[in-house]
Amino acid sequence: MNDAHLHLMVNHFPIIGTIFGIGILIAGLVLKNNALKNTAYILFIVAALFAALSMNTGEGAEELVEDMPNIGKKIIHEHEELAEKLALLLYATGIFSLLSIYTSSKNHKLAIIASYITLFLAIGAAVLGSSVGTSGGEIRHTEIRDNAGISAAESDNINSEITRTRNEE
């Protein structure tokens, strides 16, 4: 098993786990059910741990695929940049989940505020996760790219031309 295989095995849970966690946390908030809320917090913590695993396997995966035909280094770089932002957001969500568990268990007056901050961070992570997942899929699934009919080299040239034009404006 190589880093690309490991990366594919762990990179889905941060996104899917966060989406499930959001639904469970909303249900817990609406029903005022601490068991549901704590379940969501645990999902967010596990999603953050899987994000760390995904980040640790991403570089090795990149090395294995970056020189393959129709891949393009630019698309990998864009995925990597988005993934780094998502990882940071998931780490923050995990930290606030720990805080939420603690404040909830102590019946602290800030428990509900911590819950809503955690929910807000998780929603942001799910939205960003959608972009990260799409950009990761585009690396090997050229059929889902906006420019599906052209090669990676042509795509890099077009993107470079667009960037240069924008910079000149």
Image: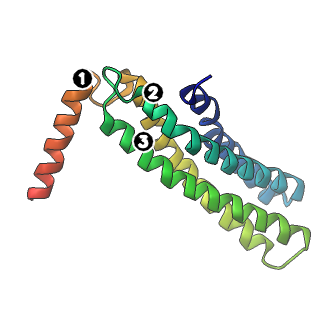
Identity of the amino acid at label 2? Leu
Q: Residues within 10 Å of mark 1 (few under 14, many from 20)?
A: some
Q: Residue at x 61, y 35 (%)?
A: 12
- The image quarter containing residue 156 is top left
Q: CA distance from mark 1 to mark 3?
A: 18 Å
Label 2 sits on residue: 64
Q: Position of residue 81 (x, y in %)?
A: 42, 49
Q: Residue at x 56, y 58 (%)?
A: 88
Q: CA distance from mark 1 to mark 2?
A: 19 Å
Identity of the amino acid at label 1? Ser
Q: Position of residue 154 (x, y in %)?
A: 19, 28
Q: Residue at x 84, y 55 (%)?
A: 38
Identity of the amino acid at label 3? His
Q: Residues within 10 Å of mark 2 (few under 14, many from 20)?
A: few
Which SS class for mark 1? loop
Q: In this view, which residue lies farthest toward the left?
A: 168
Q: Residue at x 77, y 68 (%)?
A: 99
Label 1 sits on residue: 151
Look at the picture and state if 161 lies above or below 144.
Answer: below
Q: Position of residue 32 (x, y in %)?
A: 85, 61
Disc marking residue 79:
3
Q: Tell me: 88 left or right of 116.
A: left
Which SS class for mark 2? helix
Q: CA distance from mark 3 to mark 2?
A: 15 Å
Question: Where is the N terminus found, in terms of image quarters?
Answer: top right
